Image (cartoon, rainbow, N blue to C red):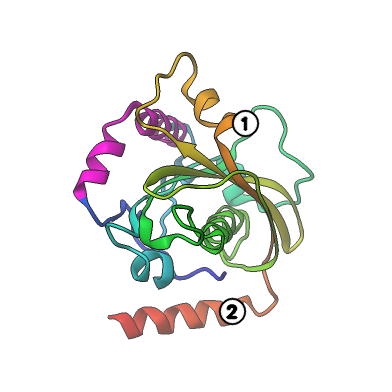
Amino acid sequence: MTQSETAPKSAGVVADEQYAGQLYSHKIYQYYQALAEKHAVVNKKCGDISESIWPNLTGDTLIGPDKIGLRSGSLYLIDDKFLTTFEDVEELVEGENNVGYTFFRLGSKISGHPKIVHGGLLATLLDELTCRVAFQNFHSKKGVTANLNIKYLKPCFVNLYVLIKCTFVNKKGRKCITKGQVYRVDLDAEIDGDIAEFVESKENLLTEAECLVIEPKWVEDLHNQAKEAVAARS
């Protein structure tokens, strides 16, 4: 995946307002939204992160009530130092934040096996979203996927909400590693205790991936391609 020109912070894409009403009014979404808002109060750069829902495949072509019925705007908890210094990082230490959360409602027309979301779609979403976190740790805010390793742990059934959590792992020079995790989100479940522990439990983990993202030496070409794409759409 490659990064496009940024745009005003995206509110996401909704194919059916029913899905938006169900998710955005639920305490699970509101918990993560509150985390991001609280983080942005102290980390102004994080609060200013902007992104377009791009590329067209996951932001337009696959959008529909029975396809990707809802895609939330990404909620970021990234400390400002990672957005401004771009130094090498061996690993995150306790108390540091470098993560993004995005919610989806995945419908019946994007299945592979009957009633199971196509594994290739999950791979595409994981590729796109793990890259978005990596991009924030590059000065250019752009990069390309060099390697993506995926483990399919449990079936991801259609007509469900999922949370894709993407976390920075390390960075050296032009190389950044991130991990992504797909969690089932049951809006009807009784939650007893911490919401994050419930949602991000082993029982709800469906798929996980590790992505190697590179800021290429020809990164300026990505800038030019993005500008041409924006001009073509306008």
Residue 165 percent location from the top left of the image: 54, 43
Instruction: Report which quarter residue 206 is drawn in.
Output: top right
For the residue labelled by badge 2, is the local secondary structure a helix, a strand or a loop? helix
What number is the disc on residue 1?
A: none
Mark 2 or mark 1, which has the lower sequence index? 1
Residue 102 appears at what percent x and percent y? 45, 46
Q: How far apart are the two marked residues, 2 and 1, measured between alpha carbons?
A: 41 Å
Q: Residue 77's x, y, as percent?
A: 51, 39
Q: Marks 2 and 1: which is nearer the front?
A: 1
Q: Check disc 2 and give the amino acid type.
A: Glu
Which residue is at 56% across, 59% downward?
Answer: 119
- Amino acid at the residue labelled 1: Lys
Q: State which quadrant residue 140 falls in.
A: bottom right
Q: Which residues are magenta?
A: 17-40
Which residue is labeled 2 in the image?
220
Q: Is residue 49 magenta?
A: no
Nearer the observer, 121 or 79:
121
Taking depth in this image into account, of 198 and 142 the one nearest to the observer is: 198
Q: Residues within 10 Å of mark 2 (few under 14, many from 20)?
A: few
The residue to which callout 1 is attached is 202
Judged from the image, the secondary structure of the residue bearing numbered disc 1 is helix
| Contact flag, marks 2 and 1 (Cβ < 8 Å) | no
Quadrant for the N terminus, please.
bottom right
